[in-house]
Image (tube, rainbow, N blue to C red):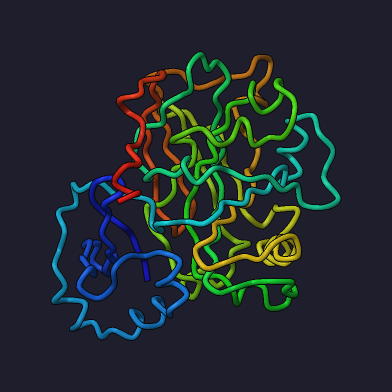
Amino acid sequence: MRFLRFGEFGREKPAILDDDGNIRDISSLVTDIEPKTLAGGLVGHLRALSPDAIAVLPVVDNSVRIGAPVGNIGKVIAIGLNYADHAAESGLAIPEEPVVFMKAVTSIVGPNDPVVMPQGSQKSDWEVELAIVIGTVARNVDVSNALDHVAGYMTANDVSEREWQWDHGGTWDKGKGFDTYLPLGPWLVTADQIPDPQALDLSLEVNGTSYQSGNTRTMIFTCAEIISYVSRLFTLLPGDVIITGTPPGVGMGIKPEPVYLRGGDRMTVSVQHLGVQNQTVHEYDPALLPDFTEMLK
């Protein structure tokens, strides 16, 4: 199944995308697509619906805003330098163990929401990635059954401010967690629809120019290996998100001179079977940033 959430930021409703491409409101069946409903067997419950039961669900106008496919995400774990050719373009050694950092949950937005650069940013960059959504508690899991803990997969854009990532000391988190710097979606595609997460094409364009084109088969650490490794560091809970690294072609690595995002740029971001994102980049404008007050009510 393909789950999504629609409506105003902080007030999204749950939905599914049916086989005809219609968005169908499932708010009469479930409160939201979030950790507690994923833990409660949401995927299995809705997968058991008959085509007739789905057909009578309300259809939503396709022009509606699409939010991140999962709400109330507890944590976002990111894996750096997970493609050898991306490590090379970054001038860094291939890691012997996964490089792990975190992105702030306040960086999460919908797939087509504005990306708003922080004040004075000159080195904001793009990174198409495969995102894993955890479906069941995972602690010290073995690689052999790690994928059993996956609810599904999403497209992600790990937008990164390179000056803050590299030039201000400390951890990568500084350049990774700005508001709007993690568009997710449009869909959460359930794990049964993606039998091999190591066989997915990824691509990213800026203003119609192709910069990134890769496949998850070239990951250094597979999805199963990542889940197993991270589950030894801290417990993974339903709704947690892991973004798994980016293939080559980021702006920072372009020769002879890097290319970074500027206001007005348009990004098109895609992972095979998981849907396409379209974002417009904006110079800093607080009026365009998410209003978190609705989420706190």
Left or right relative to 289: residue 20: left
Q: Which of these two is toward me, 64 or 235? A: 235
Measured as percent of width and height from the top left, residue 236 is found at 62, 65
Measured as percent of width and height from the top left, residue 246 is found at 62, 43
Q: Is residue 288 above or below residue 45?
A: above
Measured as percent of width and height from the top left, residue 261 is found at 49, 22
Q: Residue at x 15, y 64 (%)?
A: 59
Quadrant location of the N terminus?
Answer: bottom left
User: In this figure, what is the number of numbered marks?
Assistant: 0
Q: Which of these two is toward me, 48 or 192? A: 48
Q: Residue at x 54, y 43 (%)?
A: 104
Q: Which of these two is toward me, 277 or 176? A: 176
Instruction: Give the farthest residue toward the front.
Output: 297
Q: Residue at x 51, y 43 (%)?
A: 203
Q: Is residue 82 above or below residue 38?
A: above
Left or right relative to 139: residue 178: left
Q: Residue at x 66, y 62 (%)?
A: 223
Q: Is residue 249 above or below residue 199?
A: above
Q: Which of these two is toward me, 96 or 197? A: 96
Left or right relative to 222: residue 105: left
Measured as percent of width and height from the top left, residue 283 is found at 41, 18
Image quadrant where residue 207 sits: top left
